[in-house]
Amino acid sequence: MISRLSAQAFALAALTGLLTSAPAQAQAPAKPAPSVPAAITTNSGPVATVNGVAIPQQRAELLVRESMQQGQADSPQLRAAIREELINREVMAQEAAKSGVTKKPEIQNELEMARQQLIVQAYIREYFRTHAISDAEIQKEYDRIKLERGDKEYKTRHILVGTEEEAKTAITDLKKGAKFDDLARKISKDEGSKAKGGDLDWQAPGVMDKEFASAMTKLSKGKLADAPVKTRFGFHVIQVDDVRAAQFPPLAEVKNNLVRNMQGQKVSKLLEELRQKAKVE
């Protein structure tokens, strides 16, 4: 693999289900980002009462909201099913408490972990209510990524070897008439591309290792680099098969992924600031 690894911000496990971090280049259209839930309305009266324990209406509203976010329509049938589910949970929970299972240390630890996760998720939702990402910020990030990727893409193939001498020998062999595909399959150490004759498909310079990208962009269509290119992966023999204008998706297609990525970055920055203030022993 030769793509440059972008700096991945530390992500809270609590973001699962709230934020989905996407690659900075976000190439595929995304499903709409889930809206931040509004507060659950408190309706009078419990959903049901089980052995004298009332099940609050808010729990039913929470499950209704979650079902609607997954595409189900609010209906009497859905609410009836949710009522039955809540009754079943309460019956089982009461029996579990009677059995003493809730007093076990491992269960207490799991309960505390679940409590923390819910609290953190609620805090993050509230944080983005007051720190919403503006359209101007989204446009700026989109423009930055587009500029970083460049206005051209290169259909490239390479042979990766361990030493400069091996790379020079491969270049000599290619100039003498050896086929790039055959040589790549025979000696390349890049398991991801060697079976394809070293083919890396279309790549933008902005997502490649800096040294590799620099050499690649200096080559025109059909040209082989005269000298090996050293990166952190080893020594590369590079050939550009074709060049085209960059295929970059419009902002509308990648906006949701960009927002998720930017939210992840904001949460990471927030966490870093909180860690700096915290006294950790």
Image: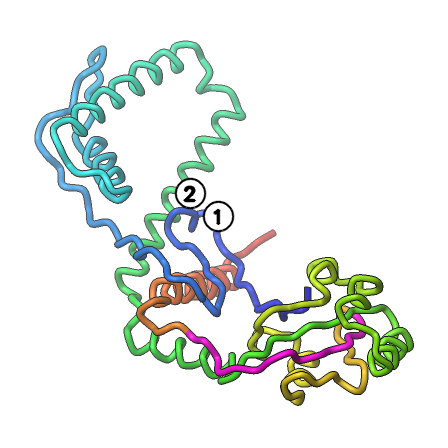
| Residue 78 in the image: above or below residue 95 | below
- Horizontal side of 201 relative to 145 (left or right) equals right
**Among numbered discs 1 and 2, the one appearing first in the sequence:** 1
Crowd rating for badge 1 (residues with CA inside 10 Å; few <14, some 14–19, many 20+)? few
Residue under the image location 39 percent in, 76 percent down = 142
- Horizontal side of 143 relative to 79 (left or right) equals right
Quarter of the rendering occupied by the N terminus: bottom right
Frontmost residue, 70 versus 264:
70
| Residue 114 in the image: above or below residue 220 | above
Q: Is residue 35 magenta?
A: no
**Image location of residue 57, percent across then percent down:** 16, 30
Q: Is residue 245 magenta?
A: yes
Q: Amino acid at mark 2?
A: Gln
Frontmost residue, 96 versus 280:
96
| Residue linked to disc 1 | 13
Q: Main secondary structure of the magenta part?
A: strand
Q: Cβ–Cβ below 8 Å for labels 1 and 2? A: yes
Q: Amino acid at mark 1?
A: Ala
| Residue 181 in the image: above or below residue 11 | below
**Image location of residue 218, percent across then percent down:** 66, 89
- Horizontal side of 60 relative to 250 (left or right) equals left
- Tell me the magenta residue range: 234-248
Residue under the image location 52 percent in, 83 percent down = 152
**Mark 2: secondary structure:** helix
Frontmost residue, 150 versus 201:
201
Q: Residue furthest left?
A: 44
Name the mark on residue 72: none
Instruction: Using the numbered discs, state the Cα–Cα distance from disc 1 to disc 2 in whole angstroms.
Output: 8 Å
The colour scheme used here is rainbow
| Residue linked to disc 2 | 117
- Horizontal side of 107 relative to 137 (left or right) equals right
